[in-house]
Image (cartoon, rainbow, N blue to C red):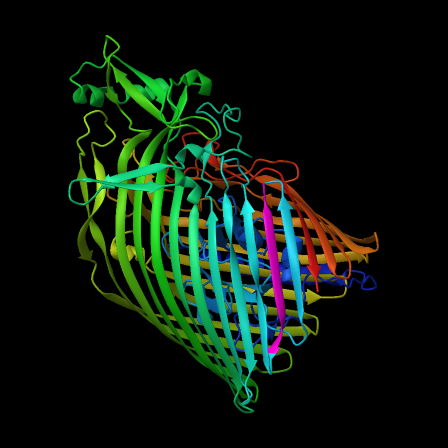
């Protein structure tokens, strides 16, 4: 059970932070002014509020990133961008999408954050391999990304301790537009553009998007990313005084997924001469023509042709409508709705078991081979499965490795609507709203195990058995596949949510503002999974087809279920001065368990979330700060992982435990002179785990209470310096940014360390009237930083070594040049 005494410690920590910062603030030289402010406290934000509120007046933590600020940060992907906001730790090493988001120490993959577009959730649920960052992109059509941490998030969204709201451009009275071209050392070529203006009486249009190709940050032997996005907003000012907006989005994108790989052998000796952790990958060009074999559900063989270069192919078609109107002096109405159709077709090569000695691997199959071929096996030899010819293990330090090829198909839809009425009554803004959400998905997952040589872009291998006379008896593998049909799982499900919420923003005095909120949600679920069968396909020349799993046509309903939850929040903001305020908040909510768990594919346990916050905001011409101390508990939090056993069999392992996370996040800027500005974005947290248990009978997952949550650092953030100058008749900015991630652990028992690491980024901008030229370099010094181990096998007790020897590293140095023309 979580020890509530930690709450008093966190409150003391928060009070210290809140009281200490003004001492620093008032010691500053107020005569030093700076016009370029990183924090715009007067900016009106709409996320987490009934009608909009300035950051200075809000009783919660907000980060606002307009499109220009996003460009200045030069993020590699969405996770890299959101990870530049305080309190949010992200891992951006998976590629363009499907990365890790952890808000204030929460041990999840981002399910507790609501990714939104135009104030409505993109998905509502994180579907199977279709997380919200998979279905969403930031491009030049993005007007603002608003990030709310904690605060009223659980009142304005389901399953939310944070909201990431991607707000697109609207039509303008005067025509404007921009074209941006970007080229990078990774083989990147990208074109963004938008146009905005009037298209009729009282009607405006904004339209734009991007197209992009990219060979990738690692050399896979084929193109990593290819696709684009198109968005529009058509807005009409109605004669009755209301505003009606129709918007749409079409996304068609393919993105390669990068997984962990060996870094060292069991003695700690590096294997970077075989596979470079900065630039290489086990993704193989030899997997562009895969025959994915499983059983057909009737005892026969099912073969599907797949291509690793397909990557994560996502297709999103969305159409939405918005209406808002000030009905009279008291009442304001806002209504939004959107329908989305989403298709995912996904191929990836996942990490399997650790690399093995080639002879040891062959010997492990001796008994099975003798059983299959009459007890006459005398020796084994390796051959290349695609190109033919013998393979000498000595060329790869006598190592071979098994990896898992996965194909996942997910067809889903969602309809979401939100209607709210806000009344301005003297000192109160009271909002009453209703939310409706309908979601469904159908999922098919099939996996196979491959045997490879242990090096970058590896070739698949066959392991051939011979008798004493040198006669070939058979092959352990078939076309490089060591286990056909290692996993198969299919299901379908649907969910429906109805929520009612009410908020009150009460301006008690000129200085004191209190807001409260209540959200009642009722959810209904239905679904089930299809049956499985395991068969021997009867090919006597190989062992690969001896136990092939497939999916039958028998549908097993999981039964209908429902639940009801209540969320509440209370917050207060007190303005000590016009430019100095403090705030406090507490909230309680329930996050719904995995929808897939209701169909037998994971966990369906709900999580109760309690959050406490104390914050400070201070703003002058040359110094500003936004600091928040927080404390949160999550009871229970559940992790689900695919575990790969020695025989290639794959099963879902589910772990459950309670967590607490006290900490503090700080964003501050200081401009000592007009030409120079320093920024610090730092988070410190102490996330702890207790009462850990395994929900699988075959796993014992005992870890001491107080252990650190897996893959979560105590400290992370960045320090940057911006230098403003003039050159070539242009307003120029040069930015150097030092990024830091503290030590983490791959496992619950905290036995294998992910070492702390740092990177340095450089960005230079030249701005003329219409033109902007930008050069950015990521990981300037080519540092190695490992973000995860191998979760297919090390999540409980680590890797048997004090430091990680199998993991996913950050990308090596890359540079991008982009030019923007605005008209």
Q: Position of residue 537 (x, y in %)?
A: 18, 34
Quarter of the view holding residue 40: bottom right
- Residue drawn at (27%, 24%) of the image: 476
For image coordinates 59% across by 37% down, the residue present is 812
Magenta-highlighted stretch: main secondary structure? strand
For image coordinates 60% across by 54% down, the residue present is 191
Is 143 in front, or is 768? Answer: 768
Question: In which image quadrant can residue 432 be found?
Answer: bottom left
> Where 561 falls versus 758 (above or below)?
below
The residue sitting at the front extreme is: 200
Q: Is residue 375 left or right of residue 416?
A: left
Residue 571 versus residue 595: which sits nearer the camera?
Answer: 595
Residue 195 magenta: yes
Going by the image, does 758 lie left or right of 554?
A: right
Q: As displayed, is residue 777 above or below residue 341?
A: above
Quarter of the picture containing the N terminus is bottom left
Residue 595 in sight: yes
Question: Which residue range is magenta in the image?
Answer: 187-199
Tell me if residue 240 is in the magenta stretch. no
Report x, y in % for residue 737: 68, 47
Q: In this image, 308 relative to 478: left or right?
A: right
Looking at the figure, which quarter contains the C terminus? bottom right
Can see residue 587? Answer: no
Q: Quadrant of residue 380?
A: top left
Residue 607 against residue 394 in the figure, above or below: below
What x and y, as percent, mark residue 603?
A: 31, 54
């Amino acid at each position: 059970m979580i020890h509530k005494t930690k709450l008093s410690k966190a409150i003391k920590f928060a009070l210290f932070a809140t009281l200490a910062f003004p001492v620093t603030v008032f010691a500053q030289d107020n005569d030093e002014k700076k016009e370029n402010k990183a924090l715009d406290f007067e900016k009106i934000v709409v996320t987490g509020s009934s009608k909009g509120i300035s950051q200075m007046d809000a009783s919660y933590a907000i980060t606002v990133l307009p499109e220009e600020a996003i460009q200045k940060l030069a993020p590699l992907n969405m996770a890299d961008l959101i990870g530049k906001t305080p309190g949010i730790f992200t891992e951006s090493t998976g590629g363009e999408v499907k990365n890790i988001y952890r808000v204030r120490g929460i041990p999840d993959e981002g399910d507790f954050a609501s990714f939104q577009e135009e104030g409505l959730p993109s998905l509502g649920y994180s579907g199977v391999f279709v997380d919200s960052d998979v279905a969403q992109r930031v491009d030049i059509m993005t007007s603002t990304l608003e990030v709310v941490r904690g605060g009223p998030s659980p009142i304005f969204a389901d399953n939310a301790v944070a909201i990431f709201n991607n707000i697109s451009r609207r039509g303008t009275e005067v025509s404007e537009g921009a074209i941006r071209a970007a080229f990078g050392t990774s083989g990147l070529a990208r074109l963004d553009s938008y146009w905005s203006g009037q298209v009729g009486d009282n009607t405006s249009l904004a339209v734009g998007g991007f197209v992009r190709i990219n060979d990738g940050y690692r050399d896979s032997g084929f193109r990593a990313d290819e696709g684009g996005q198109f968005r529009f907003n058509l807005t009409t000012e109605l004669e009755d005084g209301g505003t009606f907006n129709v918007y749409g989005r079409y996304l068609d994108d393919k993105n390669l997924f990068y997984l962990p790989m060996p870094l060292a052998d069991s003695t700690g000796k590096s294997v970077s001469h075989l596979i470079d952790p900065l630039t290489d990958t086990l993704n193989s060009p030899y997997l562009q023509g895969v025959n994915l074999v499983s059983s057909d559900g009737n005892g026969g063989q099912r073969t599907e042709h797949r291509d690793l270069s397909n990557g994560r192919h996502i297709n999103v078609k969305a159409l939405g409508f918005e209406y808002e109107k000030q009905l009279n002096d008291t009442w304001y109405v806002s209504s939004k709705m959107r329908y989305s159709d989403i298709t995912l077709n996904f191929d990836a090569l996942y990490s399997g078991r650790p690399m093995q000695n080639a002879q040891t691997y062959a010997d492990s199959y001796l008994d099975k081979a003798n059983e299959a071929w009459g007890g006459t096996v005398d020796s084994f030899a390796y051959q290349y499965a695609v190109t033919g010819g013998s393979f000498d293990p000595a060329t790869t330090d006598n190592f071979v490795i098994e990896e898992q090829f996965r194909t996942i198909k997910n067809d889903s839809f969602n309809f979401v609507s939100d209607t709210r009425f806000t009344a301005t009554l003297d000192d109160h803004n009271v909002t009453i709203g209703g939310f409706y959400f309908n979601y469904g998905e159908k999922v098919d997952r099939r996996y196979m195990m491959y045997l490879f040589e242990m090096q970058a872009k590896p070739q698949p291998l066959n392991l051939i058995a011979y008798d004493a006379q040198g006669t070939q008896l058979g092959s352990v593998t078939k076309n490089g596949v060591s286990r056909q049909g290692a996993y198969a799982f299919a299901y379908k499900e649907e969910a429906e949510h109805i929520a009612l919420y009410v908020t009150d923003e009460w301006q008690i005095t000129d200085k004191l503002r209190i807001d409260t909120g209540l959200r009642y949600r009722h959810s209904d679920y239905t679904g089930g999974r299809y049956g499985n069968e395991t068969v021997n396909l009867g090919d006597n020349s190989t062992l690969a087809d001896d136990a092939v799993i497939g999916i039958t046509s028998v549908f097993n309903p999981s039964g209908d279920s429902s639940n009801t939850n209540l969320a509440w929040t209370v917050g207060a903001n007190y303005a000590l001065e016009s430019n100095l305020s403090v705030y406090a908040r507490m909230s309680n909510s329930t996050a719904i368990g995995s929808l897939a768990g209701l169909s037998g594919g994971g966990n369906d346990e709900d999580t109760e979330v309690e959050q406490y916050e104390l914050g400070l905001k201070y703003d002058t011409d040359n110094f500003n700060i936004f600091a928040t101390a927080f404390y949160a508990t999550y009871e229970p939090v559940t992790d689900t992982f695919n575990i790969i056993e020695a025989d290639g069999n794959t099963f879902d392992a589910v772990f459950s435990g309670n967590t607490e996370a006290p900490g503090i996040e700080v964003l501050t800027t200081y401009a000592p002179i007009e030409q120079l500005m320093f920024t610090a974005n730092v988070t410190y947290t102490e996330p702890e785990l207790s009462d850990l248990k395994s929900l699988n009978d075959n796993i014992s997952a005992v870890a001491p209470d107080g252990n650190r949550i897996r893959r979560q650092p105590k400290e992370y953030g960045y320090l940057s310096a911006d230098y403003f100058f003039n050159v070539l008749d242009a307003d120029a900015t040069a930015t150097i940014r030092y990024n830091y991630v503290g030590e983490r652990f791959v496992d619950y028992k905290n036995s294998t360390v992910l070492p702390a690491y740092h990177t340095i980024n450089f960005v230079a901008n030249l701005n003329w009237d219409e033109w902007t030229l930008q050069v950015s370099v990521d990981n300037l010094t080519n540092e190695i930083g490992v973000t995860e181990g191998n979760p297919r096998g090390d999540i409980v007790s680590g890797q048997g070594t004090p430091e990680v020897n199998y993991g996913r590293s950050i990308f090596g140095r890359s540079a991008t040049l982009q030019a923007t023309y605005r008209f």
